[in-house]
Image (cartoon, rainbow, N blue to C red):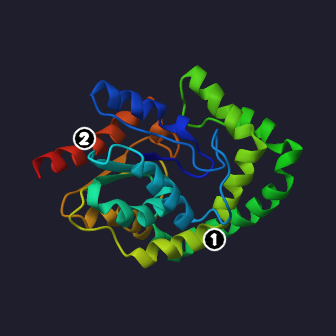
Amino acid sequence: MLECGAFGCAADWFVVQTLLAEQGVRSLAYDRAGLGYSDPGPDPRDARAIAADLEALVASIDPNSRLVLGGHSMAGLFLRSLAPRVRHRLDGLVLVDAVTPESINHPAVARMVGGFRLAMFGLDRVADLGVMQAWALMAGDRIGLPTEVSLEKRRIYASASHARTAAREVQQWPASAAQGRMQGPFDPDLPVAVVTAGAVPLPADLQAIQNAPAVDSRAGWVDRVPGALHASLLGPRFAHRVVRGFEHVLSVSREG
């Protein structure tokens, strides 16, 4: 089960899913309520609501199947709230340059989140004016997806309804972080792979916060990928390193 980051959609995972399929691994990426092609959900769009939606989606899948959760970027907040809900069938997690609920306590992250939220309050009010269409042409696909998939992502990115919901998710960042912290850390018996973007400069203490879910796991895996940026980590050049994270989790769960 693959969860996208802020302003993302199911298409973000195309390259990773292609590589997983080549190994015979089934995967499901989806659009959260209000994003991409999904109908909107009730406000607030916080981690509790998103985890409840994904729990319902998981429940509709073969109840005998086992799960590995993958999350990029802001999805790290949502997976912290989701994991306890599906622990009975969860085999591990892969966090791809993901934020943690604890990171908001870091001054640099707090400033970033504050500025991001302020901008999102403005975007929420003007999304219907078509402001995202020009921006989508320039920045709609920083992953580097194949042409047809890139066009789909840019169309979604330009959508007013998608932008509005994405903005409201970001507005709930502090609440989502608090909800995740209330759940406590992931179960240390869960295999956790943390794959991060090596071209993104982070202070050592913030890297430690990002790596903590894997470090605290009895079967953790940390891979900082040289040259990878936050979005391009999911693209053709680096996606195989993300897949290695899934391979680690799957191998440990099979041995168990």
| Residue 182 falls left or right of residue 162 | left
On-image quarter of the N terminus: top left
Check if mark 2's residue and mark 1's residue have beta carbons within 8 Å.
no
Give coordinates of residue 27: x percent, y percent: 38, 37
> Which residue: 43% across, 59% down?
79
Q: Residues within 10 Å of mark 1 (few under 14, many from 20)?
A: few
> Which residue: 17% across, 44% down?
251
Q: Quadrant of residue 246?
A: top left
> Which residue: 37% across, 76% down?
184
How far apart are the two marked residues, 2 and 1, measured between alpha carbons? 35 Å
Outermost right residue: 129
| Residue 151 falls left or right of residue 87 | right
- Residue 164 to residue 211: above or below: above
Q: Is residue 120 visible?
A: yes
Give coordinates of residue 51: x percent, y percent: 49, 60
In the picture, the disc for residue 91 is: none
What kind of element bears circle 1? helix
Q: Is residue 197 visible?
A: no
* Residue that mark 1 sits on: 111
Q: Quadrant of residue 214?
A: bottom left
- Residue 57 to residue 151: above or below: below
Q: Earlier in the sequence, mark 2 or mark 1?
A: 1
* Residue that mark 2 sits on: 247
48 vs 223, nearest the viewer: 48
Outermost top residue: 148
Give coordinates of residue 73: x percent, y percent: 50, 53
What kind of element bears circle 2? helix
> Which residue: 64% across, 61% down?
170
- Residue 102 to residue 131: above or below: below
31 vs 156, nearest the viewer: 31
> What amino acid does circle 1 point to?
Arg
155 vs 139, nearest the viewer: 155
